[in-house]
């Protein structure tokens, strides 16, 4: 088919983007846009009608995701995307709820909500764009910042150790846990799709560069980070969650680590609390 | 269909009556977190909601409880939470999100004495200003103050109706004494209970603007899944719901948010008057303290003092026109409340040159009517 010069072929994901809000706010070299694209691809390839989705974000760079997707979308308060999503899911279990947010939002201020939603096996998909820092506020130390890494509030290096996010998710009760980088766009899209179609609390950590506020301070150029994602990662499905620390000095392990079945919160609630319609069997004997 | 409203006469406490009011109003979702003395509201809702096809979930803290009711509200259902002082403090940031995203919900505060952990099992009315100004930024809020278990039932329904009408969080500012007091509560026939639900949008979905106000200043509200593709944000936003970081958009949004409450004060404000027509002294009170104030008025009358009572059922927005009108004909105001001067400041603000006194209490007990009488005698002298 021939394209006329005046009407270029629309981007295949355009229907899922609020085009009237473009350009976005993400910096050059930021990985959030790539993670967002993979997530939109997953929604599209899932085949589920778009009005059966809702996206919820917290606050921060990736928290702006909800503002660009053209479905019912909610940009909430800092750290509270998960309880907002919980309210949606428990009131409307037929809606596919995706939480798209950052590491600071989900694991520092929102950490308590994360572990409890995982414990309940809340049937939502949590996508965490992990850029190892608080990007929006200028690169302060986060709960994911590597030991000794420099930040705007740890000039001499981070004295603390970061969370191993897949281990935290697994220990808290998540039934689907995966990690990819934004460079692994297809694997990531497939993982998000799988997580959407999967019942239960799904967690996907996505490593993503913040060259402006993390890389600059740690002498790591944008392409260095991507090279790390390419050369210093290894795909190991089913890897032990306890061995998933992010350390590019060794290899950073990617893949699907957990994929198990467990009844979800909404399922169990309705089964245990809502009056059940009488079965034919009961009616006959009763 | 069988009604789930427990029509009849009951001997129940205020917290339970509140839960029954919520069920009668059509509440379908409750995000809870235990706290004395509001726990019974959550307990009752956990039993009643599944019976009406609703959902109770116990969240991990009050921040989560408050946030969950906003998420659930956007699925189109009526939602509620209940707490007391410490939890109310934790909810405040999310109250601001509810205000600015115009998400209807009802928040019950069964007040106990503070600050901090304070007296968990003893009543107070120390959160009245927090209800008004507790979240950051500038906003208007609606708060109702029930004086009895019956009113815990009635005003919970009223709170849902106001919340749905104005797309705003509504507070029920109760207290431990009313919450834990058992009295006769009459629950009317379901068909006679007036309930209001939010207006849903109609028309073209692609041109819909979720914050374009209707005639009463309030925009129709779609639910998740209706296909309107709404974007909802706590950032300053335009009528489309899109963030716009400009002074003009801020002003436009704020004018509308403030206006929808301020311009409908007559519909929102409820008060009750007792022996005020010939009164020299106007006692202003609300919640449990209005019961004390009522007794004080009766005793004053027996002592030949012309005292009357203005009971605030709606505390916020403050019924300032009522106080201003009264200030033209009374010699003094006495505000009776279990704090050391919160609503009394509002009364003072509207009283002009008329003297205004506080019959207050630091919390943990009701105010003896004698305290009010003593001030009345001084004020008249």
Image (cartoon, rainbow, N blue to C red):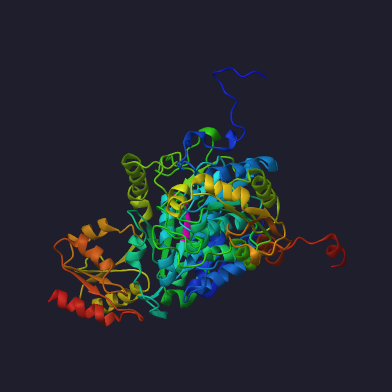
Report the predominant secondary structure element of the magenta stretch: loop
Tell me if residue A58 is in the magenta stretch: no
Residue B259 x, y percent position in the rendering: 34, 46
Q: Quadrant of residue A113?
A: bottom right
Residue B89 x, y percent position in the rendering: 40, 67
Res. B102 in view: no
Q: Is residue B162 above or below residue A274?
A: above
| Quarter the N terminus of chain B occupies | bottom right
Question: Which segment is the magenta one?
Answer: B101-106
| Closer to the camera in the image, B315 or B141 | B141
Q: Is residue A34 above or below residue B121?
A: above
Query: Going by the picture, which residue comes out furthest to the left?
Result: B381
Residue B126 x, y percent position in the rendering: 34, 72
* B183 on left or right of A89: left
| Closer to the camera in the image, A25 or A48 | A25
Res. B363 in view: yes
* Number of marks drawn: 0
Tell me if residue B103 is in the magenta stretch: yes
């Amino acid at each position: 088919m021939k394209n006329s010069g005046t009407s270029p072929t629309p981007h295949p994901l355009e229907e899922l983007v609020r085009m009237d809000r473009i350009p976005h706010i993400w910096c050059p070299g930021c990985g959030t846009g790539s993670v967002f694209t993979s997530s939109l691809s997953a929604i599209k390839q899932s085949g589920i009608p778009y009005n059966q989705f809702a996206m919820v974000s917290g606050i921060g760079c990736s928290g702006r995701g909800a503002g660009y997707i053209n479905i019912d979308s909610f940009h909430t308060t800092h750290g509270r995307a998960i309880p907002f999503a919980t309210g949606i899911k428990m009131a409307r279990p037929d809606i596919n709820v995706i939480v798209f947010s950052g590491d600071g939002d989900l694991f520092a201020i929102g950490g308590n909500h994360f572990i409890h939603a995982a414990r309940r096996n809340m049937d939502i998909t949590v996508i965490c764009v992990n850029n190892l820092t608080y990007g929006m506020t200028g690169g302060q130390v986060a709960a994911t910042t590597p030991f000794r890494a420099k930040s705007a509030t740890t000039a001499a290096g981070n004295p603390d150790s970061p969370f191993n996010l897949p281990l935290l998710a697994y220990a808290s009760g998540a039934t689907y846990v995966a990690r990819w980088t934004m460079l692994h766009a297809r694997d990531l899209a497939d993982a998000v799709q799988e997580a959407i179609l999967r019942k239960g609390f799904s967690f996907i950590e996505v490593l993503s560069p913040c060259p402006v506020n993390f890389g600059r301070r740690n002498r790591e150029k944008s392409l260095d980070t991507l090279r790390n994602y390419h050369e210093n990662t290894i795909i190991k499905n089913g890897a032990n969650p306890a061995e998933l620390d992010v350390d590019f000095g060794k290899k950073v392990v990617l893949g699907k680590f957990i994929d198990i079945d467990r009844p979800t919160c909404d399922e169990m609630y309705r089964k245990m609390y809502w009056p059940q319609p009488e079965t034919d069997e009961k009616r006959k004997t009763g | 269909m069988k009604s789930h409203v427990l029509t009849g006469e009951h001997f129940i406490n205020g917290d339970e009556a509140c839960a029954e009011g919520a069920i009668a109003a059509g509440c379908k979702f409750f995000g809870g977190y235990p706290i004395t003395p509001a726990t019974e509201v959550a307990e009752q809702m956990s039993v009643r909601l599944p019976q009406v096809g609703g959902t109770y979930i116990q969240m991990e803290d009050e921040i989560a409880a408050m946030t969950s009711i906003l998420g659930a509200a956007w699925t189109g259902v009526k939602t509620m939470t209940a707490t007391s002082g410490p939890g109310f403090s934790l909810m405040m940031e999310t109250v601001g999100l509810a205000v600015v995203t115009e998400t209807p919900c009802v928040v019950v505060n069964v007040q106990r004495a503070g600050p901090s952990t304070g007296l968990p099992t003893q009543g107070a009315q120390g959160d009245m200003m927090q209800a008004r100004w507790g979240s950051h930024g500038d906003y208007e809020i609606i708060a109702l103050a029930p004086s009895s278990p019956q009113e815990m039932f009635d005003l919970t329904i009223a709170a849902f109706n106001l919340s749905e009408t104005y797309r705003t969080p509504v507070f029920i500012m109760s207290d431990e004494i009313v919450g834990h007091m058992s009295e006769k509560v009459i629950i009317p026939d379901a068909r006679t209970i007036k309930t209001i639900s939010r207006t849903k949008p109609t028309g073209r979905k692609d041109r819909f603007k979720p914050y374009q106000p209707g005639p009463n200043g309030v925009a129709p509200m779609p639910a998740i899944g209706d296909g309107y593709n709404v974007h909802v944000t706590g950032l300053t936003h335009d009528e489309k719901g899109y963030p716009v970081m400009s002074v003009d958009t801020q002003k436009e949004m704020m004018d509308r948010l403030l206006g929808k409450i301020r311009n409908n004060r007559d519909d929102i404000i409820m008060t009750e008057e007792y022996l005020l027509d010939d009164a020299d002294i106007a006692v202003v009170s609300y919640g449990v303290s209005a019961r004390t104030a009522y007794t004080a008025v009766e005793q004053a009358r027996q002592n030949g003092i012309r005292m009357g009572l203005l009971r605030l059922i709606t505390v916020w927005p403050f019924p300032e026109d009522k106080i201003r009108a009264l200030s033209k004909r009374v010699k003094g105001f006495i505000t009776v409340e279990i704090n050391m001067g919160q609503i009394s400041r509002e009364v003072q603000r509207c009283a002009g040159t008329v003297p205004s006194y506080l019959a207050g209490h630091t919390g943990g007990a009701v105010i003896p009517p004698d305290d009010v009488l003593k001030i009345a005698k001084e004020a008249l002298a």
